[in-house]
Image (cartoon, grey):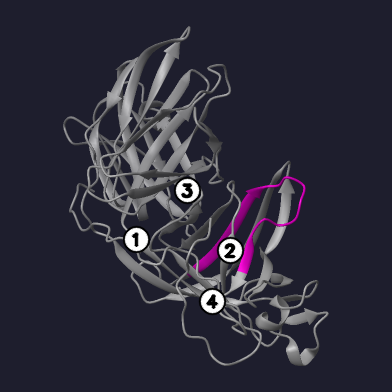
Amino acid sequence: MNPLFIPRHAKSILKIVFCALGALVAAPFAQATNVTINLGQAAQNLTLNGLGANGSGLGQYLVTLGSCNSVGSSVNCTLSGSFTGASPGFTSGTYSLVTSYISSGGTNPFQGIEQAPGSNLFSFSAVPSTGTITLTLVTSTGTTVVPVLQNNQFVNGATVGFIYGLGATCTVVSPANCSVAGVGAAAGSSITGQPTGSASFNVGSTYYFSDFAFSGGYQTTLTYVNYSQQSVTCTTSFYGDNGLPVSMPFTDQTSSVRTDIMPPGGSLHVQTQAPLAPPFVQGWAQATCTGPVEAGLLYRYFVNGTAVGEASVNAETAPTTAFATFAQTATGIAYANPSGSAAATVNVQVYGTSGLLLGSKIITLGPLQHGAANVGPLLGLTNFTGFVKITSNIPIITLSLNAEAFPVFSSLPPGDLPAGTVIVP
């Protein structure tokens, strides 16, 4: 594999490295918007180990993007810091660039090569078949996961570049030759430092799933349908009640973040394969797709290994602050806070058929946290029919399920209300 990378103009200074990750030409995705952000100084070092020049005089490197740790045979390397930008939703926040691969006990399998003899720019010359590179952005409005390298492919439209500052240091080579070019030509040398940089990526469509469940009698199925004429990449992140990532045991993989590349007309339909015995696990999910898809999630309830009920989870395209839908004592509600930094104050109120307020409860959801309950027990009501109103000080996502005849249950109509909607007090 010898991917091409977009070369950019570099100042004529030493101690500069630019690794542009992505294909040379980005495909035009429907409804996609390009976002460019500035990456502040990383808290970790980017290190290049020189391998010496090849037969064409181009310097070669082993590339380590950040601080690395091993979990079993998996190696994860992280560069993280703050970012700023001008695009709506991406004006400020934190970033984390994570490079992962399965180690075979040898050297770092990510290798680079100079763009031209004496250049301080390089591109990757080899990446491992098990390798992934993912950029995660956390803002006050939510979390965005940008796949850069997935399924042994660099994702079109995603580029990340870094530049060393004056604090970079070298080994083996002389101080006068302490540069990316100098290190690449000298086998056994290295250059390391905390870089700054920039990133660009396409923002297509975002989908939120207010609830999933597996184990304790449940399985969850994720479905995407790409009806467009372009390939679409969907990256789906799963979170538990406490806001931490949850590894989903799907038939094809077990992970808290999955990336699916679908060709034109392609689709995905995959179910978890978790033990049906307790404990019960639930949470919520967010997907970022490079183009529009039909997105769906459902979970099934099993008794003695036989499915006896299921409900679809409506894919919401944006969080909001007010919801209203039918409810009675057994109605189930789920709610999640997609913000990566702000807590949500959620007010659940129930009204009877005559319009009288029957009860209310305030729930605090921390960043990325999730909750679910049956309305009657949540509010201490033993018997009612009417509707439930859910409001929040910041945008959240919710789901309501009709469970009057449990274990038969079903999704209720989406209760999302537009911002500014006037509703009963």
If you read the primary sequence from the N terminus, does the residue marked by circle 3 or circle 2 appear first?
2
Q: Is 54 situated above or below 325?
A: below
**Foreground residue, 117 or 277?**
117
Q: Are marks 3 and 1 in contact (CB under 8 Å)?
A: no
- Mark 1–mark 2 Cα distance, whole angstroms, equals 27 Å
Q: Residue at x 59, y 83 (%)?
A: 119
Q: In this rendering, is residue 221 above or below 206?
A: above
Amino acid type for the residue under numbered disc 3: Thr
Q: CA distance from mark 3 to mark 2?
A: 49 Å
Callout 4 environment at 10 Å: few (<14), some (14 to 19), or many (20+)? some
Q: Is residue 198 above or below residue 269?
A: below
Q: Which residue is mark 3?
A: 364
Residue 206, position as x, y percentages in the image: 33, 52
Per the picture, the main secondary structure of the magenta-coloured stretch is strand
- Does the stretch in magenta take in 109? yes
Say few, some or many: other residues with alpha carbon within 10 Å of mark 1 (under 14 / 14 to 19 / 20 or more). Answer: many
Q: Which residue is mark 2?
A: 125
Tell which tag, 1 or 2, sits nearer the viewer: 2
Q: CA distance from mark 3 to mark 1?
A: 30 Å
**Magenta region, residue range:** 93-112
Q: Nearer the viewer, mark 3 or mark 4?
A: 4
Q: Identify the mark nearer the N-term, 4 or 2.
A: 2
Cα gap from disc 1 to disc 4, whole angstroms: 19 Å
Q: Quadrant of residue 77?
A: bottom right
Eye-nearest disc, 3 or 1: 1
Residue shown at 75% from the left, 56% from the top: 107
- The amino acid marked with disc number 1 is Val
Badge 1 or badge 2: first in the primary sequence: 2
Query: Dot 1 corresponds to which residue?
Result: 203
Q: Quadrant of residue 33?
A: bottom left
Earlier sequence position, callout 3 versus callout 4:
4
Residue under numbered circle 4: 197
